[in-house]
Amino acid sequence: MSTRLRVSETAMPPRAKAFSNYRNGRLAMLEARENGHDWPILLNDRHQVSEGPGACVAMVRDGVVSTPSLTSGLLGGLTRASALTLLAGSGIAVEEREIDRSELHLADELFFLGTAWEVLPITAIDGLRVGDGKMGPVASLLEQRYSAVVRGTGGHDEWLTEAKLVSPNAVVMPGPA
């Protein structure tokens, strides 16, 4: 857990996909690495769970996936929205709400959701093992479903945009219809 707080709504809109908002997560990541951790989780100015550096946080407890609400100071991205849709479509209960730091210690599973990381398990928090210390069944299911969708084999074709290869070194994206 980072000692740095996620940038607050009163300082800069955390939902803005702006370069300066990523600096906050970068500083938290440097602190985490200095303290022997892989990645930090940032709290917001109300000391509720916000997000990681460039990724949302999801918690599984008693079969329910909880993720901080958009008012918790996070960037509500497409990966998060897609993951929540895929989980709900798999029959897994999903909720968006404020999450206390202490709840993370009681989680059956924790994982990050992000464009670069896709689904990344959090196997320990504050030196305590999460679940059995490995990627859990909900995160594994989500990783499989998400991977299939973004690679064009798992349905949700409406989420995909075809990119045509016109030469070995260039990709052309279709313009607006």
Image (cartoon, rainbow, N blue to C red):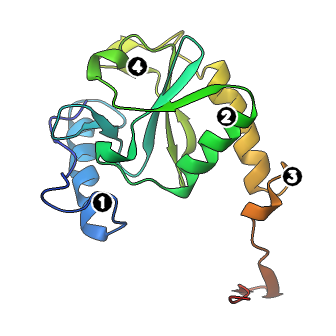
Which of 124 and 100 lies nearest the eye of the viewer? 100
Query: Residue at horizontal 69%, vertical 90%?
Result: 175
Look at the image and tell me in which quarter the N terminus lies: top left
Mark 1 crowd level (few <14, some 14–19, many ≥20, 10 Å Cα): some
Label 1 amino acid? Tyr
Q: Earlier in the sequence, mark 1 or mark 4?
A: 1
Mark 4 crowd level (few <14, some 14–19, many ≥20, 10 Å Cα): some
Mark 3 → mark 2, Cα distance in angstroms: 17 Å
Identify the residue under disc 3: 153
Q: Earlier in the sequence, mark 3 or mark 1?
A: 1
Which of 60 and 114 lies nearest the eye of the viewer? 60
Rendering coords of residue 3 (x, y %): 15, 35
> Which structural element holds mark 1?
helix
Q: Is residue 15 left or right of residue 166?
A: left
Identify the residue under disc 1: 22
Which is in the foreground here, disc 2 or disc 4? 2
